[in-house]
Amino acid sequence: MTAIGVDWRVVDGVATAWFDAPSLIEGAALARRIAELSAEIVVDLRATGMRVRLASDEHAEAVSAAARDLGLAANPVALQHLSVVIESANPSVMKPFWQRVLDYAPGEDGGLADPLRRDPEVRIRRSTEPRPLRNRIHLDVVRPAAAVEQAGLGEASGPFGVCHSDPDGNEVDLVPGAALGERSETADWQVVFSAMACYRTTSPTQQGELASAAAALASNAGFPLLVDLRPGLMIIDSGKDQWGDDAHGLELDFTDFAANLQTAARELGATADLRLPRFAQLFLDAADVAAVRAFWVAALGYTHDRRAGVTDIHDPRRLNPVLVFQQLDASETQRRQQRNRIHFELAVPTDLSQTRLAATIAAGGRLLDESKDRWRVADPEGNEIVLVSRA
């Protein structure tokens, strides 16, 4: 930690910092400075600040200096990384299925990783324990309709006709997205639970200008836009359901707002890539939704969706995936007692790990086992999370 400065922590093997910012405009100013340092630095710009992940440690001090120059302070409490772990007796058979579902690339640990570094990694690990009758955790993945068709998963099942099973029977709902209306002014946008547009950029200068333009439009509208900067790419995202009037609660027609963003992007010469939008969220069945949800709010540091009757919880900075709860029939005792073959893994900085573990236990968690830097904890109904600390 000291080698890369006090602002930075290693989270899941990557030097990472969060800098609080009073608005998207101030964050975009830092994003432009960072883009001038290196196009390989990954930036997630939010209305309350920005997360910065480095390809190497060499730019850490320069990024910190630029943040200080702009009056922005680091806040390591925001740092964490959530991934999905699937256990299987034959991981090599599982990988092709999930690669088609997610359009992921092979990861360093033998699993799969989002090339855009936005959606959760899928780690596939060998296990010879018997598979349960049905998983209580599953994924929802939303991609453009053409991409869903090209995935070639065969006939879907379930009440909505979108459910597929991997070779071990783990379920995923692969949902086709749709265009954001029929107007040509929003042709760059896809609705994949989020409303999203992905723009190819040709230079750090162009990318920085687009980030500033998007930030200005969002700040004027009072909309908490998500703006992710990647090498040669910028992703503009509403956040799950936030394009709907009932979710954002603003005097705002999101399609008009999206049209203005599209105009700004095209005027700067950015080109939309309609293949890339993707949204992934996590579903968990629970007999006592209130108790299980309270556990996961504490374990993940999440907050409740503002809408009445919605069970979603989400990262307050919208950096990690949404978790949704479904009611499970309490009489299904066998299903309630099964051990999941899918669980979550949360990487947190070492100096914050004990605080997070204590909050997780206090919220009804049961410590199952531990090692030097790993703690496996079950929620009130037996679903598991592994906390992992990295110095």
Image (tube, rainbow, N blue to C red):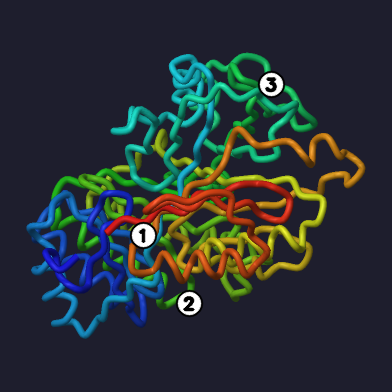
Question: What residue is drawn where x is 63% and y is 27%?
Answer: 170
269, 89: nearer the viewer = 89
314, 246: nearer the viewer = 314
The disc placed on residue 227 is 1
- Foreground label between 2 and 1: 1
* Residue type, numbered disc 3: Ala
Q: Position of residue 132 (x, y in %)?
A: 71, 28
- Foreground label between 3 and 1: 3
- Foreground label between 3 and 2: 3
The disc placed on residue 156 is 3
User: Does the CB distance between marks 3 and 1 fall below 8 Å?
Assistant: no
User: Does the CB distance between marks 3 and 2 fall below 8 Å?
Assistant: no
In the rendered image, the vertical position of residue 351 relative to residue 56, given as above or below: below
How far apart, in angstroms, are the residues tagged by discs 2 and 1? 15 Å
The image quadrant of residue 167 is top right
Q: Position of residue 102 (x, y in %)?
A: 47, 31
Is tag 2's residue or tag 1's residue first in the polypeptide sequence?
Answer: 2
In the rendered image, the vertical position of residue 236 relative to residue 165, given as above or below: below
The disc placed on residue 318 is none
* Residue type, numbered disc 1: Val
Question: What residue is drawn where x is 68% and y is 66%?
Answer: 246
Q: Position of residue 33 (x, y in %)?
A: 14, 67
In the image, 195: left or right of 203? right
On-image quarter of the N terminus:
bottom left
Question: What residue is drawn where x is 55% and y is 30%?
Answer: 145
Bin the neighbour count of mark 2 within 10 Å (Cα to Cα): few under 14, some 14-19, many 20 and up: some
On-image quarter of the C terminus:
bottom left
In the rendered image, the vertical position of residue 29 relative to residue 163, given as above or below: below
